[in-house]
Image (tube, helix red, strand yellow):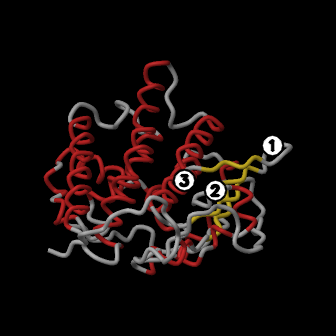
Amino acid sequence: MSQESGYVPPKVWTWEKASGGTFASINRPIAGPTHDQALPVGKHPFQLYSMGTPNGVKVTVMLEELLALGYQDAEYDAWLIRIGDGDQFGSGFVEINPNSKIPALVDHGPAEPLRVFESGAILLYLAERFGEFLPGGLAKRTETLNWLFWQMGSAPFLGGGFGHFYAYAPEKIEYAIDRYAMEAKRQLDVLDRRLAETPYLAGDDYTIADIANWAWYGQLALGRQYDAGEFLQVQEYANVQRWARAIDARPAVRRGRMVNRTFGDPAMQLHERHDASDFETRTEDKRESVE
């Protein structure tokens, strides 16, 4: 068992060494920009600064779903923010999102451009802006927001918890992996029980709750997250599997997954998107094999 032992925390923590692991070069205990870097602005109303991580996928899927419904005003420019290189600490990005996390969106449609940051806030903003994927009526709207914010509160345990210690930490710590694997499986069970009752998380309709949760848990169930499908036995969650595959088959979801993607099959990558025609040279109907 590889596990650190005998560590006694000091009375006052100080930043004296890099934390190690995949993202050590960009981890720091202070906010604010590290360098001057203006952000590009394209021709469309929405300017998205992001990367094809689960949080980034939420927003590109939402925008592609709106475009699929015929909302031409949802056309957007997607600019790649390479988080491994620290682009999110550039002055232009920090001005949009003081928390230096992707995705970040600027809506140039209003008289004064509006910044929107945090993926859940962006989904809610777009849903209200276009009147789609957020049901009307108190009960249905509330249930949708229940599951949207469930994802926002739960996914850090999946990504920053399980994903970090299972895939990215500089050493394998049994206690940490066990702790967060247990929580990841508990969360999958929460979703599985809910999806035994309804086709989608908020009921009969596909909503922003499904878009948000699918980006994390749907892709986990399809074996695309952390190479952990077998470890977590994701195939056991039959209702999540049914839901994940149904959403994965949507053309807008396939398109949204390609935008600002820098890993995996090159045919499924579109590093920056500036027009719907950008997809014409991509094999958007190509399916990836999943366990």
Classed neighbour count for the residue bearing mark 3: other residues with Cα under 10 Å, few (<14), some (14–19), many (≥20): many
Kind of element beneath mark 2: strand
Q: In whole angstroms, how far apart are the C-alphas of marks 2 and 3?
A: 9 Å
Left or right of 130, for residue 289? left
Residue 104's label in the rendered image is: 2
Name the spot of residue 4 as percent of width and height, x first: 25, 72
If the image is split into quadrants, where does the N terminus sit?
Answer: bottom left
Residue drawn at x 61%, y 63% as measured from the top left: 30
Which numbered disc, 2 or 3, marks the residue that appears first in the sequence? 3
Residue 241's label in the rendered image is: none
Residue bearing the label numbered 3: 59
Name the spot of residue 162 as percent of width and height, x first: 30, 60
Q: How many marks?
A: 3
Residue drawn at x 61%, y 70% as measured from the top left: 81
Q: Could you tell me the amino acid type at mark 3?
A: Val
Foreground tag (2 vs 3)? 2
Residue bearing the label numbered 1: 110
Give the farthest residue toward the right.
Answer: 111
Q: In whole angstroms, how far apart are the C-alphas of marks 2 and 1?
A: 17 Å
Kind of element beneath mark 1: loop
Residue drawn at x 47%, y 74% as measured from the top left: 23
Q: Could you tell me the amino acid type at mark 1?
A: Pro
